[in-house]
Image: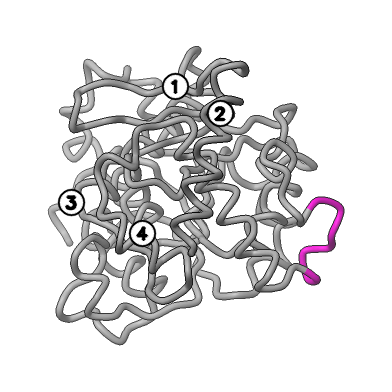
């Protein structure tokens, strides 16, 4: 693209970021394992924001069912590895990008990857790989941006000294080597995450509970919608920009849920209220699973 100019591409960013901050974004590197749904939306937003370098990873190929929400999924990328299609389309936006692509080996390379990046964004839904990413992010003192498995857009920023999600929610993976985390453990982790989401948000009001029951019972894949996925990914990208630029404020490790239906932010409940609601949620989930 002979007429591409980075300065012209990012000229409308001024007012949100200074010239010096824009250069910091250009010089930054971000790691995103999983560039399908939320990870892909975060990747797209950061590319357009002017971040200049990425390490991206994914093990899947684009399928027709991805077209409803994954920004790099198009008719001409169906059947292609997600990581390669995302790289190629990102280079069409900014041909000056530095992008390293990895497949399933990325978990074994975290000791190399994390020291070289400013921040990591978790776009994978693999419980074992996710657990190792959290652990290594703490070891290498890197912030990790994530989102809950929620019908409402959400975002968390887990900094090096923050508790890991497997400790906060009592996952069975605690103390287990990531290579020994099996499917049964992964399902239990998902159920505990859903319990947290239902306790601390009003997500249950905005989904078909019959479909949710089928998901919980393993009868169908998770449901997901374009606006929810894109908003969550964009919120993750916004927090990545904040980390890169060292801006104060933002989200903590507990995060929040953005209720687009009611036009409000839902934050974690105080412990006494959460304890009461959690008991009700557990009864509800038991009934749902039955």
Where is residue 54 shown, x and y percent of the image? 47, 53
* Mark 2 or mark 1, earlier in chain: 2
Q: Nearer the viewer, residue 182 or 249?
A: 182
Indicate which disc residue 254 carries.
Answer: 2
Q: Which residue is mark 1?
A: 267
Q: Which mark is residue 163?
A: none
Q: Which residue is drawn at the image coordinates 38% and 80% (left, top)?
A: 61
Range drawn in magenta:
174-180
Residue at 49% of width from left, 34% of height from top?
199
Is residue 103 one of those drawn in magenta?
Answer: no
SS for callout 3: loop
Residue under numbered circle 3: 4
Q: Are marks 2 and 1 in contact (CB under 8 Å)?
A: yes
Q: Distance of mark 2 from mark 3, alpha carbons?
A: 40 Å
Mark 4 neighbour density, 10 Å: few (under 14) some (14–19) many (20 or more):
some
4 vs 3, front mark: 4
Q: Quadrant of residue 64?
A: bottom left
State left or right for residue 119 relative to residue 223: right
């Amino acid at each position: 693209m002979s007429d591409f100019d980075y300065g012209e591409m990012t000229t409308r960013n001024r007012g949100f970021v200074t010239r010096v901050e824009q250069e910091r974004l250009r010089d930054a590197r971000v790691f995103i394992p999983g560039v399908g749904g939320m990870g892909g939306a975060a990747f797209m937003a950061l590319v357009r924001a002017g971040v200049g370098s990425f390490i991206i990873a994914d093990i899947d190929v684009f399928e027709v069912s991805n077209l409803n929400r994954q920004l790099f999924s198009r008719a001409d990328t169906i059947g292609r590895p997600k990581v390669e299609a995302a790289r190629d389309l990102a280079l069409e936006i900014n041909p000056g990008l530095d992008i390293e692509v990895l497949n399933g080996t990325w978990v074994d390379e975290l000791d190399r990857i994390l020291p070289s990046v400013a921040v990591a964004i978790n776009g994978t839904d693999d419980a074992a790989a996710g657990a190792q990413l959290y652990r290594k992010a703490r070891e290498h003192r890197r912030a990790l941006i994530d989102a809950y498995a929620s019908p409402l857009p959400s975002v968390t920023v887990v900094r090096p000294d923050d508790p890991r999600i497997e400790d906060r929610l009592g996952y069975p993976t605690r103390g287990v080597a990531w290579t020994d985390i099996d499917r049964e453990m992964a399902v239990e982790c998902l159920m505990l995450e859903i319990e947290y989401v239902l306790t601390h948000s009003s997500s249950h009001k905005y989904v078909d509970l019959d479909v949710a029951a089928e998901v919980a019972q393993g009868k169908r894949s998770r449901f997901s919608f374009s606006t929810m996925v894109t908003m969550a990914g964009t919120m993750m990208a916004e927090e990545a920009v904040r980390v890169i630029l060292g801006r104060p404020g933002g989200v903590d490790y507990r995060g929040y849920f953005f209720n687009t239906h009611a036009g409000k932010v839902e934050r974690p409940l105080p412990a006494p209220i959460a304890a009461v609601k959690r008991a009700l949620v557990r009864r509800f989930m038991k009934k749902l699973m039955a």
